[in-house]
Structure formats: structure tokens, C-alpha cells
Amino acid sequence: MTKADLVERVTQQISRTAGPMISKKDCARVVDAFLDAIKEALHAQQNIEVRGFGTFKIRHRKTRMARNPRTGSPVEVSARPVPVFKPSKELRAMVADLLPLDGAEPGSWDDDHEEQEMRQA
């Protein structure tokens, strides 16, 4: 799913639940603002907890040795901060059991899943 697909899905969801009160352009602004807020918080080394979804945070990787894939020679990879996402128990269970999200129309998740499988084939 691309960001454009996400904006489309958010627009459709809001239209179904609240009526056509928000345009796709406004939804795109909301999605952009949400993503910007996450990026800014991570840049400030703050954790972002979205209950029922998961936690975004910065993890500090230690210096380590790796191999250059072309030459096979050892290369030192310096210590660095990296963004990580830890899914909530609910999200892990939903993915593990392949359950539809709350609020999804009956069969809508299965249809999307089947479409994705067909695209991959």
C-alpha cells in the first residue's frame, strides 16, 4: 500500500462513517501531518505510542563488523540510531490470525487480501 492508497482508504473510511465532509486533499494533509509528527518525535528521540497499533522509537545500534558484498572484505559499520516499530499485542494477534480489522465490512479484508495475492502471482 502506498501513501496515495492510504489517503484513498482514509478518505473512503471517513466518507462511510461521517459523510462526505472531508476532501481527499484534506485527508492527504492529515496523513502528511500525522507522518510529520512521527518523524519530528523520532528526531527528538521521543517514543510514539499508538495504543492498539504499536510504538515507534529510536534504537541505538552498536558498532559492528560486516562484509562488503562485492569484495567479501570486512567493513566496520559505525554505531548509529535507527527507527524501529514494535507492533502492539492486538496488531500482532490480528496479523498472526489473519483477522479483519474492527469496523471492516464483512469480507472486505478477504477481498483485499485475495486481490493482493492475485497481483503477486
Image (spheres, rainbow, N blue to C red):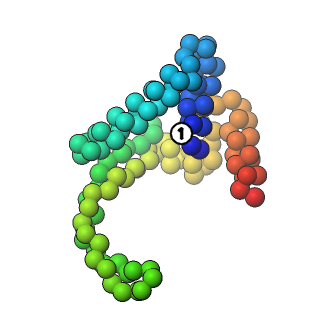
Mark 1: give few (<14), some (14-19) or many (20+) Cα within 10 Å. Answer: few
Query: What residue is shown with label 1?
Result: 3
Residue 49 visible somewhere in the drawing:
no
Question: Is residue 95 found left or right of 47 in the rendered image?
Answer: right
Rendered image quadrant of residue 110: top right
Horizontally, is 56 left or right of 93 in the view?
Answer: left
Amino acid type indicated by mark 1: Lys
Apparent side of residue 43 relative to residue 97 in the rendered image (left or right) = left
Q: Quadrant of residue 14?
A: top right
Look at the picture and state if 115 lies above or below 4: below
What quarter of the picture does the C terminus occupy?
Answer: bottom right
In percent of width and height, residue 62 lies at 25, 67
The residue tagged with tag 1: helix, strand or loop?
Answer: helix
Q: How many marks?
A: 1
Depth order, front residue of 28/9: 28
Residue in view at x 34 percent, y 34 percent: 37
Residue plotted at (31% across, 80% down): 75
Residue 89, x across and y down, in percent: 45, 45
Q: Residue at x 53, y 47 (%)?
A: 93
Is residue 63 something that shows in the picture?
yes
Task: Give the x, y percent position of residue 91.
Answer: 50, 44
Quadrant (top left, top right, bottom left, bottom right) of the N terminus = top right
